[in-house]
Image: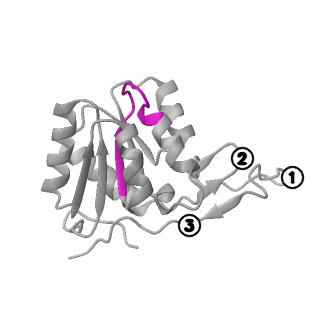
Amino acid sequence: MAKPTPNDRINLTKLTCLVIDDNALSLELISQIMTAFGIGKLIQHRSAEASMRVIMEQPVDLIITDGQMPGMDGYSFTRWVRGLEHAENRYAPILLLTGETRASYITRGRDVGASLVVSKPINPQALLDRLFWVSLDEREFVESDFYSGPDRRFKVVKLEDGVADRREGEVVAKPERLLNTGS
C-alpha cells in the first residue's frame, strides 16, 4: 500500500468505530470528529463495562478509548479485548487516549496492547494522522502467554549474529488493514 499524501482521501463509510469515554464532552468531541471524517457507524459508550457487550456481539473496525475512567479503565479494557480468544475484535486497532503523558502511562498502554497511545486533548488533524498511521501499520499481531497485541517494537532491526529472537515460538497473526486510501 502506498503511503498516503495530502491529496488522498480515506473512505470510512463502511467502518464501525467504538468510542468510549466517561467524560460526556470528550465523548461528544471525538464522536463529532469521527462523524466529520465520514465514519459509517459510530457506537458511543461512557464506560468500558457497557462496551464489553458490543465487543462480544458485533464486529468493530476501530476502538477509541479513554485511558482513565472509573471502574474498568481503558488500559484494562484494552487488555481484556486483546485477551479474547476466537474473537475477531481482538485484532481491531485500539487508540488509547490519555491526558497523562508520563512515560509510565505510555509504556503501560503499549504493554496492554494498544495500537497507539494518544495524548489528550485531541484535535481533528492529530486524530486523522493517527488513523492514517494505524491503517498503514505493518506490525504483526503477537500472541504469547504474557502479551497479545501489535508487536511492541516499531522498528524492524536485524538481530546481531548469535542473538536469539525472544519471540521464538510465539503465534503471530496478521490483521486486515483498517483503511483503504485512494480517490
Q: Amino acid at mark 1?
A: Gly
Distance from disc 2 to disc 1, alpha carbons, whole Å, reads: 25 Å
Q: Which residue is mark 2?
A: 145
Bounds of the magenta segment: 62-75
In the picture, measured across the screen, residue 176 lies left or right of residue 58, that is right
Number of residues whose C-alpha sits closer than 10 Å to that of mark 3, classed few (under 14), some (14–19) or many (20 or more) = few
Name the residue rendered at 40%, 73% in the picture. Answer: 1
Give the x, y percent position of residue 150.
Answer: 54, 53
Give the x, y percent position of residue 154.
Answer: 54, 49
The nearer-to-camera label among 1 and 3 is 3
Compared with residue 74, is residue 128 higher up or lower down, i.e. above or below? below
Name the residue rendered at 58%, 62% in the picture. Answer: 86
Q: Amino acid at mark 3?
A: Lys
Q: Which residue is mark 1?
A: 162
Q: Quick one: SS at disc 2?
A: loop
N-term mark: 3 or 2? 2
Q: Of residues 5 and 12, which is closer to you in this image?
A: 12
Name the residue rendered at 41%, 62% in the picture. Answer: 136
Number of residues whose C-alpha sits closer than 10 Å to that of mark 2, classed few (under 14), some (14–19) or many (20 or more) = few
Give the x, y percent position of residue 182.
Answer: 25, 75
Distance from disc 1 to disc 3, alpha carbons, whole Å, reads: 27 Å
Confirm whether the magenta stretch covers residue 143: no
N-term mark: 1 or 3? 1
Number of residues whose C-alpha sits closer than 10 Å to that of mark 1, classed few (under 14), some (14–19) or many (20 or more) = few
In the picture, measured across the screen, residue 66 lies left or right of residue 80, that is left
